[in-house]
Image: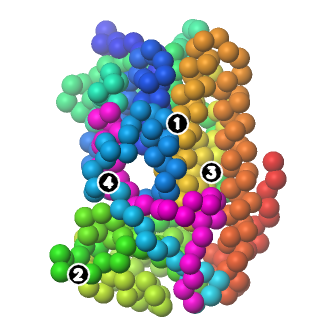
Amino acid sequence: MQNLLETNVLIVGGGPAGASAALSLLKYSDLKVVIIEETNLESVKIGEQVNSSIFDLLNYMGIEKKSFSENNFIQGYSNTAAWGSERIMVRDSIFNTETESFQLNREEFDYMLLEKVSEKGGIIFPRTKCLKFEQIENDYWTVELKHETKGNFSVKAKYLIDATGRSGSVCRKIGVESKRHDELTAIGRFFYFNESDMIKQDIIIESIEDGWWYCASLPDRKMTLTFFSDAHIIKEKRLEKSENWNELLSKTKHIKHKISQASSGGKPWVKNAFSQVTDISLKKNFLAVGDAAASFDPISSMGIGFAISSACHAAKAIIDADLGHENTFQHYQENINMIYCQYLETKTFFYQKEQRWSDSAFWQKRINMQRISK
């Protein structure tokens, strides 16, 4: 018989959402927590913009600002956009009034969160695949797993959390449905600067006929440059080829100048960036957090903040449910739905500000989007 590990909460996914759920559970309850992460924690991570409210969330989980090194965050000194016009203008956040922004060093940030989970007694299995999920009597979950070198084993848990990002791999395997609202895809590259190069610490967005570009300074003299468009446009234009990606970049008015002194690190990478919301209400003792619960257009800058806040709320729902309170998971889902509906309305308003390419397939879809009410 396979080795069986028993725990109270099994979290699949070791990113910020999964780690934050674990940290909240470990701080505010005596529940035992196991995290399963399929990768070796070295996959490509895009630097992400956050505002100062992230420090309140981290403090809630028991992590003080001084725990981070100087390389974890860099101050964002300028946030501008050429959107609706070719002129560069200051871009206020469309979702909050925070003016102070930072760029994350995602590799260090994610790894630090997992270190804190381990310090507080959580168990983490990297390089481990989930083979099979089964819900047994009393609504407990058993999951068959395979570690890269240690072989097969199983985990039995009362509660299961999907923290696998936009892929929502646990949701898909157990039959939980998501509603997708677009096919936005990111294709980008990292650029590197020499010590002698002057780098302005800023974020700039520039819209073009087939989508929009995002450029941001990252820690360690690095810059991310990403093009966002619909998946079929990226495929038709074969933007995975460096020469095609570069040609599209050359059509920008402002962003192309940002990397004129930099060297590129490899071919373009591709990541999903679509908006979706998941309904977990039909499964007992199951929650999704972060992008697996609801994922947002990167224009919103909601990714990391929502990943952590949803994880904290999910942990609270589990703790309350374990104490015998009713409908805690239902209330969690209702809150996710409310946030997502508000986001869709604001996203529609923001995209409709760009009217220069009304015949473009990309902008046509977004200009004609209907406001979605709850």
Residue 45: which quarter of the image?
bottom left
4 vs 3, front mark: 4
Question: Which residue lies under the disc numbered 1?
Answer: 311
* Residue type of the residue flagged with mark 1: Ala
At x 19%, y 77%, the residue is 194
Q: Position of residue 187 (x, y in %)?
A: 43, 68
Nearest to N terminus: mark 3 or mark 2: 2
Above-or-below relation of 265 to 309: below
Q: Is residue 50 above or below residue 68?
A: below
**Residue 356 location (% of width, % of height):** 67, 87
User: Residue drawn at (35%, 78%), measured in percent from left and top?
Assistant: 200
What is the spatial separation of the Cα atoms under label 3 and label 1, in whole angstroms? 17 Å
Identify which residue, 64 or 192, lies in the foreground: 64
Horizontal side of residue 366 vs 143, given as left or right: right
Q: Which mark is residue 197?
A: 2
Q: Secondary structure at mark 3?
A: strand
Residue 34 at x, y percent in the picture? 38, 24
Tell which circle, 4 or 1, labels the residue nearer the N-terminal end: 4
